[in-house]
Image (cartoon, rainbow, N blue to C red):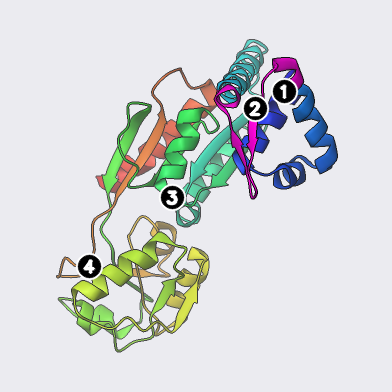
Amino acid sequence: MNQKTLRFLEQVSRYGSMRKAAENLNISSSALNRQILALEEEVGMPLFERLPRKLRLTAAGEVLVAHAQAVERDYRSTMGRIAALKGMERGTIRLSTMGGLIYGPLLALACEFIRQHSRMLVRVEIQPSPEAIAARVMSGESDIGLGYNILPNPGLRILQTIDVEIGAVVSPDHSLTQKSALRLSDCIQYPIVTGTDTMAIRSVMDHAFASAELPLQPTVETDSIEVIKQFAMSGSAITFLNPFDISAEMKRGALIWLPLVERYFPIPSLRLVVRSKGVLETAAARLAENIKSQMSAYSG
């Protein structure tokens, strides 16, 4: 039961499909199936229930997948310690976050970290929800998690939390910048750029406009936070984000963030989390500390 076989098992359990797991592993489905069958023969019990549309772990499979994840964590930890003994930092840092955050200050932090630690591989994994980020960190598949509204959990240690208010985002020469008190009703006469329904910001905007009893009729919909910001920078278009999302653009004077006097938008909490058990390796701890310092500077 070597590490390679355990990785095969973990991938099949993650995708619930032999074909999708095989594609991710870059091997044939038949070869992967033979590996799983051989592992089941070795264990003496089925590891998956073969359902019509998916594979589901049996109790024995769940035990073995937990073992596989523990083996992977121990391997990464051991290699990190060996690298430290050699006086050089090698290895991989896995950061789970949301798509919008990577285009904010997180990108600049990651670039600076890579410049200082060129031997490290920083793997940024975009997750669809705060629950997915939490799950990745608690399982040890990610070292660090950064996302909005990650709920407190005994399996997580929260390093930093800041509350980020959503407001209107416009170009510096937009006419809305002349208003002393901005209301949501002031915004609907301009082209509005929104995310698609796959993005968290869209459901937040839908709720806010419904609460204000205003129609939300977007001119542009996109699943890219970068495209959203580009449209806002282009001129008359308006969108709704928090200052942390556009901190780089605000710093260079490309976008303006305007607070709303009404409280139709919730105030999300941005949280930086790691596993509650275990200790981060040196490089991962340093990256986490850099992110924490950036968040502290913003909240201050």
First to last magenta residue range:
41-62
Q: Residue at x 19, y 67 (%)?
A: 264
Q: Residue 121: tell me if it is visible.
A: no
Reading the image, the residue beneath label 3 is 129
Corner quadrant of residue 88: top right
Going from the N terminus, do you reach mark 3 or mark 1 first?
A: 1
Determine whether, in the image, residue 182 is placed left or right of residue 67.
left
- Residue type at mark 4 is Pro
Along the line of sight, the residue nearer the viewer: 247 or 58: 58
Quadrant of the frame with the N terminus: top right
The three-letter amino acid code for the residue at tag 1 is Glu
Label 3 – label 1 distance at C-alpha: 33 Å
User: Badge 2: few (under 14), some or many (20 or more) residues near its Cα, within 10 Å?
Assistant: many
CA gap between label 2 and label 3 equals 28 Å
Quadrant position of residue 70: top right
Q: Is residue 230 magenta?
A: no
Say which label, 2 or 3, has the lower sequence index: 2
Q: Residue furthest bottom?
A: 189
Of marks 2 and 1, which one's residue comes earlier in the chain?
A: 1
Is 149 placed left or right of 76 in the picture?
A: left
Q: Which residue is mark 4?
A: 259
**Which numbered disc covers residue 293?**
none
Q: Quadrant of the C terminus?
A: top left
| Residue 21 picture location, percent across and down | 71, 42
Tell me if label 2 and label 1 are in contact, CB under 8 Å.
yes
- Residue beneath disc 1: 40
Q: Residue at x 28, y 83 (%)?
A: 215
Element under disc 2: loop
Q: Amino acid at mark 2?
A: Leu
Which one is in front in this view, the residue at disc 2 or the one at disc 4? 2
Q: On residue 47, which mark appears?
A: 2
